[in-house]
Every structure is written in structure tokens, then in C-alpha cells.
Amino acid sequence: MKRIIFVLIFTLFFSYVKSQEKIQNIIIPEKFDFFKEANQYNLNYLLKAFFDKEGFFTIYDSELSEDSPIDSCAFVYPTLKHEKNFFITKILVEIKDCNGNILLKSVEGTSRDKSYKKANNESLRIALNSLRGKLNFKAKTSTKPVVTVIAKKADEPQIIKNNEKSLLRLYSIPTQTGYKLVDEVPNVIFELTKSSSPDIFIAKKGNLQGLFVKKENNWLFEYNDGNQLISEKVDVKF
């Protein structure tokens, strides 16, 4: 059976544009410069958990590979101002855009607890709580793809058994239970949960649930639409 192969040619162009789209993506530092260890005193985890709860898509900076083609200006970047002396611990949260401009500052959280961990945790929680209701960031710069679609026919068996679709390259971000597969924006397209086999994942795509399986070096998303089994080919880089 003949199928249509779509070849997508992406030409990236950069332009300064004003947009009313709200930025919902945050890159969390895995380690702060003023500490020796990653996630020292659990501060990085607390920072990530706060923005997760506020509805943001959050990832650690260490989870991004150098060749990830995502638009850095689709993210905002929280940093901490940290001060510690014998009597008091102070933490202030600053949220910056991709150009280093400060978009929002918290109040200065303070603690007089003698335990370093408790003092840092308390100070950060106070600072973060002051940001609630203020997390509204507008995108000002963007990288957009220009897409040219070329269609041609080839004598190959069909892999996608529902309507043919052009394939967008997805990129994997590791999670504690598996992976998130994102596009260039980055929007989360799939959430994958590990199984006992490295070639099979439990998959969720929006409201659809199924299996994400590797067959003959192709990754497929298989699910039942109520009437028949649907098998979609997915172009993903792990």
C-alpha cells in the first residue's frame, strides 16, 4: 500500500516580537552558586515544587541537553539572593527572562533558626509565598519555525493506522517515573511511565491513554479509540 511521506523542512528565524502568550515554563537550577552541593538543604526541590503547584511546567537545568532546540525565551529563570550571618538567614527570589532582565522579586524571607537547614527552608518558603498571585509572565522574544511540507509517494507499508499525520520531532526529558516528551515550544505531548521492559512505556497523550512501544526501531503510540486499535508512529529523540 502506498503511503504519503511528509518531509518537514524547518528553517528557524529569529525576530523580536511582542506576544500576549503567558510563559508557563520554568528552568530550575539544580545547584546554587553559593552552595557546594546540588539541592543543598533541599532548596532546589522546594523551589521546583512551588512552581509545580502553581501550574508551571518545570525542569532542572541539568535535564536539558546542549542540542535541545527549545526556545530559551519560552522559559523564565528563578534565582536566589542568599545572605547568612551568625544571627539571621535571608533569602530573596528573583525571576528573570532569557536576557537576564528581572521580571519579579519576592519579599526577603528571613529566619533566626540556628539550624542551617531549617533557617534556609523557612526563609525560602516566606519568599515564595509572597509571589503567589503575581506569577504572570509575558513572552517578548521567540524563535519560530517556518515549515515547508513536501509530499511524495512511496511503496512502503503503512505504520500509522489512523489518519496520516506529519511527524514532529519530540525530545525526551527524564522524570522520576519515566519521561516527558516535548516539542520545540516546549509543550508536553506525552507523559511516559516505565514498565518492566525498556521498549514499553505506559503512555498518556492528553485524554488518551495507551502504550508507547518500540517495534522494528520505530516508536509507536498504541491506543484503543473504542472501535479499533490505533497505532501512531512517533519521531522522538531519547
Image: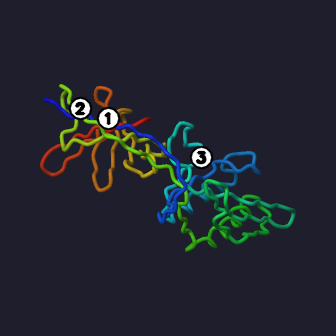
Q: CA distance from mark 3 to mark 2?
A: 40 Å
Q: Amino acid at mark 1?
A: Val
Q: Residues within 10 Å of mark 3 (few under 14, many from 20)?
A: some
Residue 79, picture quadrant: bottom right
Residue 173 spot, x, y in % from top left: 48, 43
Quarter of the N terminus within the rendering? top left
Residue 61 marker: 3
Q: CA distance from mark 3 to mark 1?
A: 32 Å
Q: CA distance from mark 1 to mark 2?
A: 8 Å
At x 87% / y 63%, what residue is drawn? 86
Q: Is residue 122 above or below residue 9?
A: below
Q: Is residue 236 above or below residue 109?
A: above
Comparing marks 3 and 2, which lies closer to the viewer?
2
Which residue is tagged 1? 7
| SS for dot 2 | strand
Residue 152 marker: 2
Question: What's the colour scheme?
Answer: rainbow
Question: Left or right of 211: which side holds 169?
Answer: right
| SS for dot 1 | strand
